[in-house]
Image: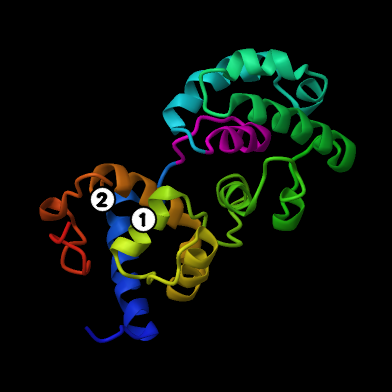
Amino acid sequence: MARESLKSKQQRAAVIEARMFDHYGGGECSLDYENPFHLTVAVVLSAQCTDAAVNKVTPALFEAYPTPYDMAQARVEDIERIIHSLGFFRSKAQKLVGLAQTLVANFGGEVPADFQALQTLPGVGRKTANVVMCEAFKQAEGIAVDTHVFRIAHMLKLAGPTADTPEKTEEVLLKVFPREDWLYINHQWVHFGRDFCVARRPRCAECFLNDVCPSAGKQ
């Protein structure tokens, strides 16, 4: 099979995003939050964990520690008790206290609307920073590549075998999709991955992208 050109991928990507927008609009965040601090904490907690599981623990967490100033003074063990149902809860509890302390010490208790500054916070890497920038501040600096986005990018053959990490997959997607689409892709694709492009058994026959997906019906 001939290698698909970048121009061809961009043309397919335009069709894909148009249909995604028709089906999901701009997409909705699956995490419950009220402000950028709550969102950042929720995204940190969502690592290797479902959003639904995170949404079960954050109400009690934010009731106890509603602001960075509150969480900065928390005992790690107390946060552990609240989030113990989540995977890696001990490590996450330590990161949350460190994150809050860094916000207080370096950013006046406010989550910075800056992609690089966000990544100085404990527990916040490129993916989390992308989510916060897109969702909280509506400023797309990249595309958050989580397990859904990584898998779907490869199913759609927009990313090839050499894009074998989230970082490499993001590099490809940033070339394929115009910047104005970056804001929506993560949320849209998360919903798409749950509704149609299911990891164990994709629903290709029912999928609205089956005619532009090289993998359709081959799983």
Q: Badge 2: how crowded within 10 Å, few (<14), some, or many (20+)?
A: many
Which circle marks residue 197 in the picture? 2
> Where 196 sits versus 3, above or below?
above
The Cα atoms of the two marked residues, 1 and 2, are separated by: 9 Å
User: CB of mark 1 within 8 Å of CB of mark 2?
Assistant: yes
Q: Nearer the viewer, residue 147 or 134?
A: 147
Instruction: Please indicate whether residue 157 sits to the left or right of residue 216 in the image.
Output: right
Task: Residue at the far left: name it.
Answer: 205
Instruction: Please indicate whether residue 73 sits to the left or right of residue 31 in the image.
Output: right
> Where 164 sits versus 3, above or below?
above
Q: Earlier in the sequence, mark 1 or mark 2?
A: 1
Give the magenta part as a residue range.
29-47
Residue 88 lies in the magenta stretch: no
Residue 32 lies in the magenta stretch: yes
Instruction: Please indicate whether residue 131 sits to the left or right of residue 6 in the image.
Output: right
Quadrant for the N terminus, please: bottom left
Mark 1 lies on residue: 151
Q: Residue at x 39, y 83 (%)?
A: 6
**Residue 7 picture location, percent across and down:** 37, 85
How many circles with numbers are drawn on the protein?
Answer: 2
Q: Residue at x 75, y 47 (%)?
A: 112
